[in-house]
Image: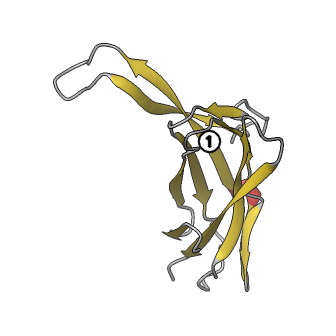
Amino acid sequence: MALPSATLQAARNEFESFQIVVQPGATPATITDATLAGLTGPGNAIAGSNITIYRAGEYTVNIASDLEGATGRWFDALIPTVDPIYREARNAFPHVVQANENANIWVDILVPTDQVTDPSQPRQMCLAELQEANDKDDECALYDVEGSVPR
């Protein structure tokens, strides 16, 4: 079975972002953590300090603000795992995802200004550790990540 993948391209000193949707199915799950130590490849690396992971917080809108708005749940607030300015741990995780609901994880990658211009190679990362509500074993969701830095 092929792993989900994301193909990313960004220039030096540019952020590139992507989202991961966690869908636990019929059983609630707890996202215990989401980490990405860095991206590495032949002659190319992006340090973990250039990567920020967020949980997309949600809120409920009871009254639409205008004709283009809607009621219901909206994912909007980005809660970091580590504050990108002060480098302090925040409370994005653990987070319980109810049965048949979704949780969104937002990943920001900053390409350093001195990034090597060789195309990077596919990498694999363990992004989310999921723990089912009735199961003590953690499962690691693996994702192939491909990226290149334009010349």
The one of 68 and 109 positioned closer to us in this rendering? 68
Q: Residue furthest top?
A: 63
Quadrant hosting residue 91 = top right
Residue displayed at 62% across by 71% down: 144
Task: Looking at the picture, tell me which residue is in the foreground, 101 or 118.
Answer: 101
- Quadrant in which the N terminus is drawn: bottom right
Vertical position of residue 149 compared to residue 129: above or below: below
On screen, 38 above or below 85?
Answer: below
* Display coloring: secondary structure
Residue placed farthest to the right in the image?
Answer: 136
Rendered image quadrant of residue 93: top right
How many numbered marks, from 0 up? 1
Q: Is residue 136 left or right of residue 29?
A: right
* Residue 123 falls left or right of residue 56: right
Residue placed most toward the observer, 86 or 142 = 142
Tag 1, which secondary structure?
Answer: strand
Q: Position of residue 70 (x, y in %)?
A: 27, 25
Instruction: Identify the residue shown where x is 61% and y is 86%.
Output: 118
The structure residue drawn at horizontal position 50% and vertical position 28%, both measured from the top left corner, is: 58
**From the viewer's perspective, is 75 left or right of 130?**
left
Residue 122: % across, % down = 63, 79
Which amino acid does the dot numbered 1 rest on? Tyr
Provide residue 57's location: percent of width, then percent of height. Answer: 54, 30
Place of residue 128 in the rendered image (x, y in percent of width and height, measured from the top left)? 69, 51
- Label 1: how many residues lie within 10 Å, few (<14), some (14-19) or many (20+)? many
Identify the residue under disc 1: 54
Relative to 146, does residue 50 appear above or below in the rendering?
above
